[in-house]
Each structure stands twice: as structure tokens, then as C-alpha cells.
Image (spheres, rainbow, N blue to C red):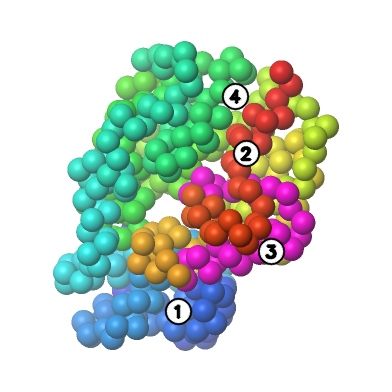
Amino acid sequence: MLENVAEVASTCTLCGACIEVCPFFKATNNPKYGAMAKVEAAISLFEGKDLKEEDLKTLYLCTRCDGCHSSCPMEIPISVVVQAARGELRKRNMVPEKYKTIAEAIIKMGSPMAAAPEKRIACIPEGFKPPEKAKYLYVPGCWSGIKLPETAKATMEILIKAGIDFTTLGEREWCCGLFLIDTGMIDEAKKLAEKNTVLFESTGARTVVTECPSCYDVFKNVYPALFRKPEYEVVHISELLDQLIREGKVSLDASKSKRIIYKDPCPLARRGGILQPPRNVVKSVGELIEYKEGGKDAVCCGAPAGVKPLYPDIANRLAEMLMGEAKEKGAEVCVGCVFCMYHMGGLPKEAGFPPLKTLSQLVLESLNK
Ligand code: SF4
Ligand code: SF4
């Protein structure tokens, strides 16, 4: 987090270049929910002024997707400004009740959904006993490990078939704390950074592989700033799958090739710069279709950072826009991050949108037996 965030925010010239790139402008056509309004609201807050209801709403209508950063001529890191503003709102005891519940679930129970720790075991393939020590540590994350266990199971089945020396934490796994980071709860996030870093190192793994693009960003880029540099490197599953396919450790049958649209996950594309590995994986099993705004310009799905629980209608509108484009382009499958999948997969079935899958599910379906 920037020390002088209020000062940096105050350099905003209100040029408006960041308004239309924000997914919440795209979903509502209302400039009050674009990025500039968030910066204006934050500046008022930092100056000690009282905020109107609409200012609070715009500050909470931000997934911190970084879609606005490259648009700002003053190079204001808008998502960092929003994060600091939310931290300030917390100090003023102006945090939405739903936020308090989610934060408490993460801190006390280890997941935003307050799941019992043993729920994390369902994703471990039958017969696989995770060793205490291994070269790789696979971290499914809360959404894959708890809510969509078949997605984490698909990854582990591929790793087993490819002969990878890996382990996973099962019921000892704990949330990465992204929600705490996004909502400005930095002291609490620091504690999680220490807890998780030490836990990961205890497995002796030299590489931590994440299913979730947000876990990837948090472990790789945020934890070293909050705690210290870890003894392992962090890779996203798309990078490992791409490597395993190139090395011939995973052999695929692309004869049942499908039209696959790839939705870049914001943290992976914009913060991680990981654009090609997932595309290579898709192309090895089917025909890749691109969104009109893809790669670093990908439009956020609208759910993270507490937006979906607070404003489900607006979050769902973005999901409908993305799934609508996938359908229009004739995609037979939409591939995206596991959290996007959970969010976008919740749209009504009657709309006839293509099914959502993770890269691992696609690869597992195409494995040469
Ligand atoms: S980080 Fe994303 S959601 Fe937040 S203001 Fe920027 S574009 Fe909008
Ligand atoms: S692009 Fe930068 S300077 Fe222009 S309104 Fe947005 S934050 Fe302010």
C-alpha cells in the first residue's frame, strides 16, 4: 500500500479518461460508477469530508480489477486509492455489515464462506494421500477447493497422471485473504501472509501452484510486500499445464475439438502478465475464440472484492454481458478463472449460455487415456 496515497490521489485532474474503462460504467452506463467518481469520493474522504450515499456506493462498486490503470495519464493507481479509502471507511466504522461477516469468516474459519475445514478434503482424488513433503505444493483456493471441488480434483488428477511430485494441504489450507486486502484490512492480511508463507514452506515445496488467479497474485506479489520473500516460487496452473503439454508429460487428443472462448482473469492478465500460457493450453485442445476486449483489456466479471454480495444485480449484469458475447460468438465452452466460473455459472440456465470450465477440466477431458 502506498504511504502517500492521499497525495497521489490529489493529482487527479478529473480528465475523465478512466470513466468508461471501468466495468461498472459499462454495466450501468452511469459515470457515477466509473473510476473517476471513485477517485473523487476517495479524495473527499481523505480530506475529512462526509460522503453521500452515492459516494459510498461507488467506492464499494470496485473489484480492484485494475482495468483503469493504463488509462490514467497521471499514473494514479486507482485500485490502491480505493483500497486506502475502504481502509479509511473502516476506521470510521462505515463498513457494510456483509463485509464484516465475510472478514470474520476468513479470519476465524479460514474461508469467505465459513466452511468447515474438512470441506476442503472433497477435492482430493480418491486413493491419493498427499505426502508431507513434495517438490510442488498445489493450492486449490477457497472457490475451487470448497465450492467447485471438481475443478481442483481435475487438476490433481492431471498432476497424478503426469507423475508430478506434489502435495496439497487439505483441511490445513487457509484463505489467501484477498478480501481483507481489497477492503483495506492490511494488519489482518499481514497475519495471513505470515501464516500461509510459513505453512507453505513447511512442505519443502520449491514451487507453489495455484488454481485461483487471485491466490496467484496475492502469494506472488502481495505477500512479499506484507511479510517477506518466500523460499518458493509461485506459478499459476495455466503455466504448469502449458509446460507439461510442451514437455509431452500430458498427451492430448484434440480430435473432439470445440470452439472455446477464453476469459482472461484480471489478476492473471493485468498483474501477472500471463496471457499466452492459458491460450496455448486452449489451442492444444480446441479452437480459441477471443473476447472483443481480451488480454490486458479484459472486462472484469464484476464479482470480486465484495461487489457480488453487496450489489448482485450489477455484478450479474456484467456476467450476462460476458456470457452473452460468448454465446453470440458461437463458443461451445467458456473457460475462465474458478471464481468467474462460480459467479457466471450462477446465471439462469434458460439463457442458453455455453457451459463454463477450467483449463484443467478441459485438459482432463482431452487426455489420451
Ligand atoms: S479497479 Fe476496476 S472496478 Fe475499480 S475503478 Fe478501476 S476499472 Fe473500475
Ligand atoms: S484518468 Fe487519472 S487523472 Fe483522469 S480522472 Fe481518472 S484518475 Fe483522474
* Drawn side of residue 38 relative to residue 48, left or right: right
Q: Is residue 56 visible?
A: yes
Instruction: Out of 155 and 233, give the one closest to the viewer.
Output: 155
Q: Nearer the viewer, mark 1 or mark 3?
A: 3
Which comes before the other along the chain, label 4 or label 3?
4
Which comes before the other along the chain, label 4 or label 1?
1
Residue beneath the point at 70% across and 25% down: 367
Residue beneath the point at 17% across and 72% down: 92
- Is 219 drawn above or below residue 209 in the view shown? below
Question: Mark 4: which amino acid?
Answer: Ile
Name the image quarter holding residue 324.
bottom right
Instruction: Out of 351 and 152, give the one closest to the viewer.
Output: 351
Question: Mark 3: which amino acid?
Answer: Glu
- Is 184 drawn above or below residue 233 in the view shown? below
Question: Mark 2 sits on what residue?
Answer: 359
* Drawn side of residue 54 relative to residue 34, left or right: left
The answer to if 241 sits in the magenta stretch is no
Measure the C-alpha gap from mark 4 to mark 3: 30 Å
Which comes before the other along the chain, label 2 or label 4?
4
Measure the C-alpha gap from mark 2 to mark 1: 33 Å
Question: Mark 2: which amino acid?
Answer: Leu
Question: Mark 4 sits on what residue?
Answer: 158
Question: Mark 3 sits on what residue?
Answer: 325
Measure the C-alpha gap from mark 2 to mark 4: 11 Å
Residue range of the region highlighted in magenta in the rendering: 314-341
Please tell me how crowded label 2 is: few (under 14), some (14-19), or many (20+) other residues with Cα within 10 Å. many
Q: Are marks 3 and 2 in contact (CB under 8 Å)?
A: no
Q: Which mark is residue 33?
A: 1
Which comes before the other along the chain, label 1 or label 3?
1
Q: Nearer the viewer, mark 4 or mark 3?
A: 3
SS assignment at label 1 = helix
